[in-house]
């Protein structure tokens, strides 16, 4: 029976952000990206809202912004962001992943379009008011995350294409691509195939953007196990479990996995992860902050319903990947 790693601790105030904290229509607040700039934490979160509120009848999605002085207690801005970007070919933006590269703030989105799901990379300002879409992948691709610096002179990202015909339904893997300008992407290489993850029998892919350590790029990933359907979530036919995994990638060549945790970093165990959510038994990291004291803050969506926080020491996480 799988269990969470002993070196990571769920925050006692979990969940740290819920729909009750949002001053506009909100029902499911999860899958957030988080960065820390000049001592302030910024969170862009996915908000799925119902009409009427609380009815469990989903009506739409938007992107909210929250700020924090300590990374634990959050204040949500009074209005959602980027609402004017919906329309035309784009049906919705969701699952934002934040990264700062060379002083610029970038957001990776999953983008539902009328012709497939695409991965988008956009630039925004420090008030998160503007959105400049730089590139959009071909369908079907998502779960893109940027590395925090150029590698060998190029921007780098992890991604998860989902080619149904070539690998089978829900058998997907984590890949790497790089770019000279964030617009044109290539040099695409396989990083983590699903069969290399013993606790996944379905898909694996990127989660929170990687953080740099002396030993390598510490990267969280999501790992999925298809299980029998459960009946205590909103989605009655839901039959999967999502875990947080952890791997260590080579600093000069991130396509090389130099270590991987043999067991999950986080397994759904707490009540807010396993009961009463939209999709129970789901953990999906979207942000990872390395503090000066070596603490790692891992932000994750739980049950596709709330946003949570877990912490660990960076050396312990590296040791977990190296199986020490």
Image (cartoon, rainbow, N blue to C red):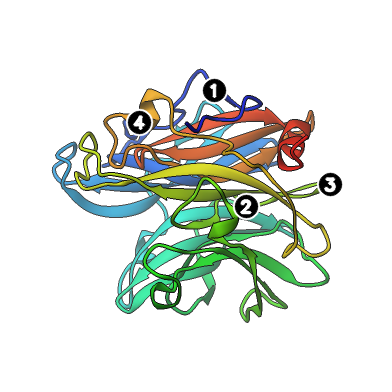
Q: Residues within 10 Å of mark 2 (few under 14, many from 20)?
A: many
Q: Quadrant of residue 272?
A: top left
Q: Residue at x 39, y 73 (%)?
A: 164
Q: Residue at x 49, y 42 (%)?
A: 243
Q: Residue furthest top?
A: 12
What residue is pinned by disc 2? 209
The residue located at (57%, 51%) in the rendering is: 197
* Residue nearer the viewer, 2 or 149: 2
Q: Is residue 34 visible?
A: no
Of the 4 image quadrants, the one containing the C terminus is top right
Q: Secondary structure at mark 1?
A: loop
Contact between marks 3 and 1 (CB within 8 A): the answer is: no
User: Reading the chain from its start, which is encountered first: label 4 or label 1?
Assistant: 1
| Dot label at residue 214 | none
Describe the element under mark 4 as helix, strand or loop: helix
Q: How many angstroms separate mark 3 from mark 1 (CA)?
A: 26 Å
Classify residue 60 as left or right of residue 152. left
- Compared to residue 218, the image places residue 298 above or below, namely above
Q: Closer to the N terminus: mark 2 or mark 3?
A: 2
Mark closer to the observer (4, 1): 4
Disc 2 to disc 1, C-alpha distance: 20 Å
Answer whether residue 314 is visible to the viewer in this image: yes
Q: Which residue lies under the disc numbered 3?
A: 215
Circle nearer the N terminus (3, 1): 1
Q: Which residue is mark 4?
A: 274
Label 3 or label 1, whichever lies nearer to me, is 3
Gap between marks 4 and 2, in whole Å? 25 Å
- Residue assigned mark 1: 11
């Amino acid at each position: 029976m799988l269990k969470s790693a002993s070196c990571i601790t769920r925050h006692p105030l979990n969940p740290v952000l819920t729909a009750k904290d949002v001053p506009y229509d909100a029902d499911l607040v999860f899958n957030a990206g988080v960065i820390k700039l000049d001592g302030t934490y910024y969170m862009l979160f996915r908000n799925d809202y119902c009409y009427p509120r609380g009815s469990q009848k989903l009506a739409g999605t938007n992107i909210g912004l929250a700020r924090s002085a300590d990374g634990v207690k959050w204040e949500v801005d009074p209005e959602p962001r980027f609402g004017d970007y919906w329309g035309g070919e784009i049906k919705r933006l969701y699952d934002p992943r934040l990264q700062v590269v060379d002083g610029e703030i970038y957001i990776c989105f999953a983008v539902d379009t009328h012709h497939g799901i695409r991965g988008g990379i956009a630039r925004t300002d420090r008030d998160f008011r503007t959105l400049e879409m730089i590139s959009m992948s071909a369908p079907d691709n998502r779960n893109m995350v940027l590395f925090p610096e150029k590698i060998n002179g190029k921007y780098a990202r992890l991604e998860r294409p989902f080619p149904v015909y070539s690998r089978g339904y829900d058998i997907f893997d984590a890949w790497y691509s790089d770019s000279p300008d964030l617009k044109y992407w290539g040099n695409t290489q396989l990083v983590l195939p699903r069969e290399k993850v013993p606790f996944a029998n379905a898909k694996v892919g990127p989660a929170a953007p990687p953080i740099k350590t002396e030993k390598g790029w510490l990267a969280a990933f999501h790992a999925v196990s298809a299980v029998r359907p459960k009946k205590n979530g909103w989605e009655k036919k839901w039959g999967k479990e999502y875990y947080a995994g952890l791997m260590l990638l080579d600093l000069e060549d991130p396509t090389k996995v130099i270590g991987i945790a043999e067991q999950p970093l986080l397994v759904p165990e707490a009540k807010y992860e396993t009961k009463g959510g939209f999709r129970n038994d789901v953990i999906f990291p979207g942000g990872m902050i390395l503090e000066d004291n070596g603490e790692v803050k891992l932000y994750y969506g739980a049950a596709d319903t709330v946003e949570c926080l877990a912490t660990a020491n960076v050396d312990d996480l590296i040791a977990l990947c190296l199986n020490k």
